[in-house]
Image (cartoon, rainbow, N blue to C red):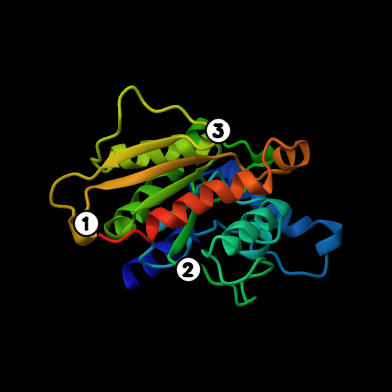
Amino acid sequence: MRILADLDARVSVCRACPRLVAWREEVAHTKRASYAAEPYWGRPIPGWGDTEPRVLVVGLAPAANGGNRTGRIFTGDRSGDWLFASLHRVGLAARPDSVHAGDGQRLIGTRMAAAVRCAPPLNKPTVDERDACAPWLDAEVALVAPSLRVVVALGSFGWQAALRTFRSLGWQVPRPAPRFGHGAEARLTAPPGTGRAGGRTEVLLLGCYHPSQQNTFTGTLTEAMLDEVLGRAAATARMPG
């Protein structure tokens, strides 16, 4: 989809947030010792995957030495190792790993996007940075919404970003706002005249604990828990009609 490719190109040159620009470029210059011989992307990370996805995975932001290094979201870090392995197990990724942008990985009916497109210090963007980046996710969701059936929000930040985005696009979001939790579900209703595929009017929002090292090392998130949510997304996306 040419319009989506144009959006990705514009995302990749954004310099709207001085603190994030300085941090992503400093990391790309100094580099982690284990990646000293590798080039770093050091720019905002566009969405990646199917251009007409049935499943959209929304995360917080790229990792400083993961996506900020490889140029692909959730690629080259421990969180991505967990996520891609699970996506592969449930049939949404062609390979069980994602190492670099040219590794042949392919998402199946699925797309990934970050709420904040630059790696933030300590993985904590400010409210102003979150809000400055929100139009990129809004624009991306607007382009892929006709084919979407499921959104998987990784962590409470991704959950809130998804709710804000769909609300800003005129979708009906339950009130009071649904609370995040692992396995939480909410139905988002499309506004009239949005050209939804097959005349469908709803997208299912699923909550999933973020596959951060803190969550996976402590057992807060297990492989079975991750597979359960992504498997639910895959099954819903494959339903006819």
Counting other residues with Cα less than 10 Å from the Cα at mark 3, is it few (<14), some (14-19), or many (20 or more)? Answer: few
Under circle 1, the secondary element is: loop
Q: Residue 155 occupies which quadrant of the picture?
A: top right
Query: Which residue is painted at 30% across and 60% down in the image?
Result: 147
- As measured in the structure, the alpha-carbon distance from the residue carrying label 1 to the one carrying label 2 is 20 Å
Q: In the drawing, does residue 155 fall left or right of residue 193?
A: right
Q: Which residue is mark 3?
A: 126
Under circle 2, the secondary element is: loop
Q: In the drawing, does residue 234 fall left or right of residue 52?
A: right
Q: Which mark is residue 108?
A: 2
12 relative to 222, above or below: below
* Residue 14 screen position, x and y as percent: 48, 55
- As measured in the structure, the alpha-carbon distance from the residue carrying label 2 to the one carrying label 3 is 33 Å
Q: Which residue is mark 1?
A: 196
Q: Amino acid at mark 3?
A: Thr
- Residue 93 appears in view: yes
Work out which quarter of the rendered image holds the C terminus and state it.
bottom left
- As measured in the structure, the alpha-carbon distance from the residue carrying label 3 to the one carrying label 1 is 34 Å
* Residue 45 screen position, x and y as percent: 54, 58
Under circle 3, the secondary element is: loop
